[in-house]
Image: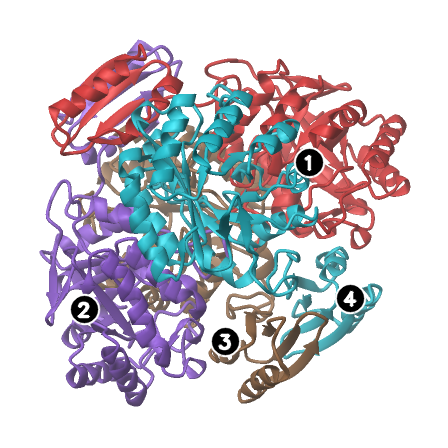
Chain colours: A red, B cyan, C purple, D brown
Amino acid sequence: MMVVMTPGAGESQIQAVVSKLETTGVHVLVMPGKLTTAIGAIGDPERVLELGLEGMAGVDRVVPISRPYKLASSELAHHEPTRLEIAGRRVGGGDTFCLIAGPCTVESREQTLAVAWTVRKAGASMLRGGAFKPRTSPFAFKGLGLEGLKVLAEARAETGLPVVTELLDVADADVVGEHADVIQIGARNMQNYALLEIAGQLGKPVLLKRGLSSTVDELLMAADYVLKEGNEAVMLCERGIRTFEVATRFTLDILAVPWLKLHTHLPVIVDPSHAAGDRRLVEPAACAAAAAGADGVIVEVHEDPEAALCDGPQAVYGRDFAAFAKRVGAHAAIAGRVLA
Amino acid sequence: MMVVMTPGAGESQIQAVVSKLETTGVHVLVMPGKLTTAIGAIGDPERVLELGLEGMAGVDRVVPISRPYKLASSELAHHEPTRLEIAGRRVGGGDTFCLIAGPCTVESREQTLAVAWTVRKAGASMLRGGAFKPRTSPFAFKGLGLEGLKVLAEARAETGLPVVTELLDVADADVVGEHADVIQIGARNMQNYALLEIAGQLGKPVLLKRGLSSTVDELLMAADYVLKEGNEAVMLCERGIRTFEVATRFTLDILAVPWLKLHTHLPVIVDPSHAAGDRRLVEPAACAAAAAGADGVIVEVHEDPEAALCDGPQAVYGRDFAAFAKRVGAHAAIAGRVLA
Amino acid sequence: MMVVMTPGAGESQIQAVVSKLETTGVHVLVMPGKLTTAIGAIGDPERVLELGLEGMAGVDRVVPISRPYKLASSELAHHEPTRLEIAGRRVGGGDTFCLIAGPCTVESREQTLAVAWTVRKAGASMLRGGAFKPRTSPFAFKGLGLEGLKVLAEARAETGLPVVTELLDVADADVVGEHADVIQIGARNMQNYALLEIAGQLGKPVLLKRGLSSTVDELLMAADYVLKEGNEAVMLCERGIRTFEVATRFTLDILAVPWLKLHTHLPVIVDPSHAAGDRRLVEPAACAAAAAGADGVIVEVHEDPEAALCDGPQAVYGRDFAAFAKRVGAHAAIAGRVLA
Amino acid sequence: MMVVMTPGAGESQIQAVVSKLETTGVHVLVMPGKLTTAIGAIGDPERVLELGLEGMAGVDRVVPISRPYKLASSELAHHEPTRLEIAGRRVGGGDTFCLIAGPCTVESREQTLAVAWTVRKAGASMLRGGAFKPRTSPFAFKGLGLEGLKVLAEARAETGLPVVTELLDVADADVVGEHADVIQIGARNMQNYALLEIAGQLGKPVLLKRGLSSTVDELLMAADYVLKEGNEAVMLCERGIRTFEVATRFTLDILAVPWLKLHTHLPVIVDPSHAAGDRRLVEPAACAAAAAGADGVIVEVHEDPEAALCDGPQAVYGRDFAAFAKRVGAHAAIAGRVLA
């Protein structure tokens, strides 16, 4: 940490900060400048942060100079990329691309099996589908629940595709853990710490979506909540952030992909469907994700989006998905990856 | 809802939208224009939204023309302002101002009782204090838990101040419900629907903080989750939103206060401490909240902020709090309110 | 400046940074830590920034530790608050409150004179009014131009109120400078440096509006452009920033008011009209500004807003303005200020 | 336009809105609903907007249902994509990809010629380089001015590459127009209307950068300012927007690329350098732009970025540029485009 004093801070104020820092055992270096004095504190940033130095007389700012995340860091914790293997599909490691596809919501057995076969034939690695749906209004459709999980399990049994589905409520942890191959934590719950810990304890890989106004630093700290439970199988998912632009549903932060590849060992997946909110933008965005170095995409597909119960406008038509997969796969191939 | 067609949409595309709308029983009106055709759908917006019309050929946009929230609306549900009475303190209704104050975190019995007496003597209506703390990193201090709740209960017994404290995890609902007078739902959990429903069932007033990137519409929909459990005692809390500006910790959305007073019957509280992140800005922000028509503020106070375990830099000094309360109260008085 | 190295940076990389820093004559201090090394550079931050150290091998980040603005700083340049006197009205200095009011646009002689008398009688200090209007679309009404300036000059002659009007184009500098008492630079032009320099040379006070996505640091750097021309009469204006929230036209950054009062000697004015976009929110926001310590507000008033050519929905009714002024003045009085 | 009344609006309020709308000659349709009444106004949206209906009693909102931009629209004005030809390079039209590269700033004749040859040999279509630089602080280096323009002209004479350079000030229009092949309007000036109009009159293609907090709608309206001068040769440039995320310099809005391709006939260029602010992210972002369907990228390249006067950390090394161009070109090829 670096403590920056105000231009007018006096010697006694500087000394008070130094004394306080020294109580924590960090190494302290005073750097007098023409205008302001800066005081470096080398050591445990957590302890320095908790001193609350910003409130002391003469202190202008406290500037962090080290990473706030730990277990998810490729620099501090884990230098090699994490490579998951999920029902025979490899994710992470730099040479595969993972195409996760399926309906927003499980609406019925027929709909789900039809989509599952469609995406499998086109080369998808995993099946996505919601049984428990988070809805902004309490009066909207919330998914089929347990019945939906059973339909997904049947789709896996038939097609062999592992299943990604969202865990929304601690109370459902056991039943979701039993039916899912990958536990999804949605954007709204990225900082629901109780849920993160439970997800970390289920012994299944976790797909962690970035909160819609969370920084990438915060995403990695949320991953730390899962990793500290001893679960190393975490996939991060960029799904668009909230900005002033309303022409698209969210703003897909494509730069987050290479940034994350630099700073974490965890695989990075992109969800172009929720970011775009309009199917005409989903394929270009998925291609961009592959070109930017993502380890995969998670895409919504529906045979008849006009009849979908949820998010139909952003679903790719089942009949278009093979061409979609081919195009995205071609960009992934240039980035040195084969479909998982 | 209003469906806007693209400029090139043909008659058959328009007719397809009309037919689809008619399946839901809404009243449909076609409005042909020079450049584009708009189609009005008057009736249940939820059902129209779920049609997924944006995906149909020739459809450009679907524009909502009615409120997405219901129970929290002052226009649709509840024309008179909601007036709560909490241990003899009135909140809401337009003639009182509620000063909630106390430490960020319960650190010890001595610290909490000292602050409780300080804020009570200065005219506070309620005591705030965290026993369970949400922390971005899993490696930070998380509060005293049950022991903290007991300290708060003791402070209430001594000072008579009702206690506001955060519920963070469904697993703690009973114990928090037992010790708290007001259940706080934090910003990170504004869309943790399982938690909202449990909070609605505890039979205690709920202080619902706005998510740091949630719109005011979404705040009111989150309130709907609590209200639909039959709990009418909900206070909304503006606590700063996340924007590009980093000079302050968050951007306090002061316009949200009068906007909410126009659109909801629920009381509106402002948290200037978390928004500012710097105690020098807290008093001006609290005065602004009172002047803008808020029903109260919730403020962090500490006798010795430099020694605080959490958020010290934004805590008002205990010795300054009486002057703080007087200044804020003077602005509230001009807005026609007396301290609760 | 502080240069933070990556965790894996080697000794030779650290030495390369030190050598490069030493070419600029700054004082260099190496701070080795457990995880990373930080290198302090005390001296001219501009020269260090221009070294482009972020691109060097082993460098993780370059963190500024001093202010980027200079002339506008209350710490570096000018410890006493700047106090302007404009046609007998005092602005700045902490004991006056300046009420600037008038129509969005000068539409006609009659309209402008009527509003001018209305606001003067209610206690306004200055008259605002647009002759040259910036419009997002080139097909919208752009103001009366020179004719509008003449109407404003006539209103000043009749009422004695000094006139605030916007300079939009370098080509109009002379004519605006001749007719205006205060030159307004609009939000869209906050970083139009040619215009800032011209405005600084006209010898008239400048009201500088914050860009709708400009940080307060950038606002103060923009002020530096005017100040460096030798013009010390600059008023800053917070007018709402662009965020994800669309319930109001912009998000009024009320915390910017006390933040600016801490960091600059220049007077701070708030424009609640453009931020709110809805007249029902303008009075609460203006009261909040006064309570937060602003030196004044600039408000749109119209005798018949439904007939206004521009921004009618946010204009306060002329008939309501006396009550408005009284209410805002009462909050200013608590903050220790009298109407200018 | 659609006027939405409040739930409590009475018949006389509805009638007043209808009467007011009818004064403009638009077609009016009243749509009574269960909760609220909506009133459609089909015709000239500009005239309806200027009525200021939001301020009328009983009016809740006025919702636009048609496009605010006109000349830039692919639906209203110009159905075929615009195809420019600049010194033999084709831009736009869907089958070429334009690689614009060069230094941030012209620092010297040697540096500029060296980079120009480097990028030409690697397949660049045009040379970029700044002679007049916009700087946030007035105390930073502002470019070589006319001397820089002459160096660029010499580089063009030697390499045959057309030159893209920024026009910053109306006063420089003639000299920039004389030396440049493409006039760049920077992000800070996207709404500097005087500059847009002058740029439109110079008879040269214009590269218009999106303002850092401008919506895509506003970008197209800014393009309308140039187009209305009779200049059809406008290229749009996405260069990152300002959001809460600070891990990267700006947030590159990759979805804006396919959105713009749907809504405008103008070519779309992406600037990954300024968005990223870190050269390690520039190639992935440029590849993403090509994959998303952009018509080109504009990239900063420097032979010795550590010695660059401006933005060195984001400059691609000259020695890496051939590989960069090959990789980006491969993604463009999958999108059906050859290097221009």
Q: Residue beneath label 4, please?
A: B17
Q: Residue beneath label 2, please?
A: C182
Instruction: Say what amino acid the circle numbered 2 marks.
Output: Val
Q: Chain of mark 1?
A: A
Residue B174 lies, in percent from the top left, at 65, 30
Residue D39 lies, in percent from the top left, at 63, 77
Q: Residue at x 60, y 49 (%)?
A: B233
Residue under disc 1 on the same chain as residue under disc 3: no
Secondary structure of residue under mark 4: helix
The quadrant of the picture occupied by the C terminus of chain A is top right
Q: Is residue A146 left or right of residue B104?
A: right
**Would you identify the image quadrant in which residue D322 lies?**
top left
Instruction: Say what amino acid the circle numbered 4 marks.
Output: Val
Q: Mark 1 touching mark 3, by CB under 8 A?
A: no
Instruction: State whether residue D165 appears in this view.
Output: yes
Secondary structure of residue under mark 1: strand
- Which label is found at residue D49? 3
Q: Label 4 vs label 3: CA separation?
A: 28 Å
Q: Label 2 vs label 3: CA separation?
A: 30 Å
Q: Is residue B152 left or right of residue C85?
A: right
Q: Residue at x 40, y 32 (%)?
A: B103
Q: Is residue A215 left or right of residue C121?
A: right
- Which label is found at residue A298? 1
**Would you identify the image quadrant in which residue D67 lies?**
bottom right
Instruction: State whether residue C148 appears in this view.
Output: no
Q: Mark 1 touching mark 2, by CB under 8 A?
A: no
Secondary structure of residue under mark 2: strand
